[in-house]
Amino acid sequence: MHEMGIAMQVAEIATASIPDNMKDVRVEKVNLKVGRLAAVVPASLRFCFEIITKDTALSGAELHIEEIPVVARCRECDTEWTIAGPVFTCERCKSGSVEILSGQELNIESIEIADE
Amino acid sequence: MFYPVFPARMLYKRKIQFMAGPESDLLPQLILPDGVCNPVRNVCKPLPAVKTYGCQVAKNSERKIEMEIKVVRKVLDVNDTMAAQNRKMFAEKNIFVLNVMSSPGSGKTTILEKTLARAEIKSAVIVGDICTTNDADRLAGTGVPVVQVNTDEFGGDCHLAAHVIGNAAANLDLDAIDLLIVENVGNLVCPAEFDIGEDARVVVLSVTEGEDKPLKYPLMFRVCNAALLNKTDLLPYLDYDKEMAVRYIHQIQPEMPVFEVSAKTEEGFDPWLEWLRNCVRQKLVKQNAN
Ligand SMILES: Nc1nc2c(ncn2[C@@H]2O[C@H](COP(=O)(O)OP(=O)(O)OP(=O)(O)O)[C@@H](O)[C@H]2O)c(=O)[nH]1
Ligand SMILES: [Mg+2]
Ligand SMILES: [Zn+2]
């Protein structure tokens, strides 16, 4: 629901990551990692990104989103598994003492620049 | 707390793109250094342009040099930094901060009105709303200092961001309070994503909303420390399965305390108030020990 705010942050970080001596380059791609638990809808994030980067250094850049599954580990029996539905109890021993290892990411990983 | 801040790192990685001609014999040479190239990316790339990473150069192929700049930053970095600042400021002032979240209309303001009137804790409230000062007016009726904030600033009106809380807190006399309550914008999705520098989070769920809310909004129930099941006075008129709702909450967050309350009749308020007083007390003890 706050995709516009997130798109603005992404654009800001990506723009700041362009090295000073390369300010005229074209950014081809911005690579993001988004956890399945991050409450972000990829399609609307891409849409917002496209709108706000219009006529900027990021104009036309593709927002590449890698979705990260929710992986949990049981603190009791050490089982690790991928959570597919909204059940946060251990698959094996049913313990509720569960640690989330991945799935809450909202990271900008890299930008790709065309060096023409 | 939920988003440790990573330093912005910059690494340069050369990436060589083959403008592939008919030399499909290039394919076996592809090197995929770990962590740099994931298979999905290659699948997405339309053929015949084949991309590879690393410094393999194929003979006689026309090539174009590109760069991939590693950034590795949390998108909510700015918010997290502000939240850490807030947390430090509140710790210095010995204030316990509670972030109250729920879907619209589940009874946050009513619960807080009753809570503030009975808790006997020196408190203040920051209340976020898209429009109107209705909630602030109601809460001010309890005699505690109230700051109303609007939420347009962060490019969305769906949650309170850390810098908004920082600015709002500047309007309060922080030396005079032990508890700061933040009534977040009515929304079960976005506020769960934004650390505001709070010590604890509670989610309010009312019995008119359906039992399966926790399953539909798991993140909210994962990040909260306690849940209030509100409007229990309406249970006789509904087919609501209270036990099932609690079971669903525990499916998402097995050790979560659930307080069944009615903000209207104040039934069930004692355990909730006790929990809250305990939180405030523990923070004071911890601070004084430091
Ligand atoms: N019957 C009953 N009604 C309640 C109870 N708690 C709140 N209400 C009613 O529910 C409606 C919404 O309550 P609010 O306290 O304004 O809810 P809120 O969560 O603050 O709403 P927003 O700030 O707009 O998201 C009001 O009409 C309240 O009178 C309750 O325990 N029982
Ligand atoms: Mg309210
Ligand atoms: Zn287990």
Image: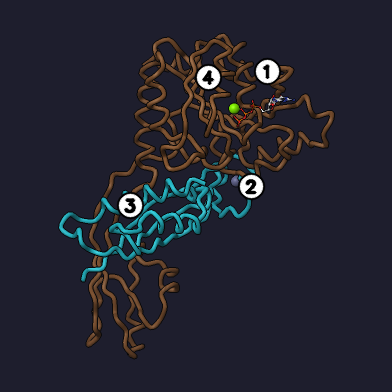
Chain colours: A cyan, B brown
Locate ligand 1 by image quadrant.
Answer: top right
Q: Amino acid at mark 2?
A: Val
- At a point 51% along the width and 25% down the height, the residue shown is B127
Tell me where residue B167 sits by quadrant. top left
* Above or below, comparing residue A114 to residue B277 in the picture: below
Which numbered marker is on residue B231? none
Tell me where residue A113 sits by quadrant. bottom left
- At a point 38% along the width and 83% down the height, the residue shown is B48
The chain under label 1 reads B
Which numbered marker is on residue A87? 2
Front residue of B252/A16: it is A16
Which numbered marker is on residue B279? 4
Question: Which residue position is annotated with label 1?
Answer: B269
User: What whole-number distance in Å separates the C-alpha atoms at marks 2 and 4?
Assistant: 28 Å
Are the numbered discs 4 and 3 placed on the same chain, yes or no?
yes
Front residue of B240/A71: it is B240
Q: Earlier in the sequence, mark 4 or mark 3?
A: 3
Q: Secondary structure at mark 2?
A: loop
Q: Of tags 1 and 2, which is closer to the observer?
A: 1
- At a point 67% along the width and 15% down the height, the residue shown is B270
Q: Secondary structure at mark 1?
A: helix
User: What whole-number distance in Å separates the C-alpha atoms at marks 3 and 2?
Assistant: 30 Å
Give the quarter of the figure containing the C terminus of chain A. Answer: bottom left
Q: Secondary structure at mark 4?
A: helix
Which numbered marker is on residue B72? 3
**Residue B231 at what x, y percent from top left?**
73, 27
Dot 1, how many residues are within 10 Å of its Cα: few (below 14), some (14-19), or many (20+)? many
Q: Amino acid at mark 1?
A: Phe
User: What whole-number distance in Å separates the C-alpha atoms at marks 3 and 1?
Assistant: 46 Å
Q: Are marks 4 and 3 in contact (CB under 8 Å)?
A: no
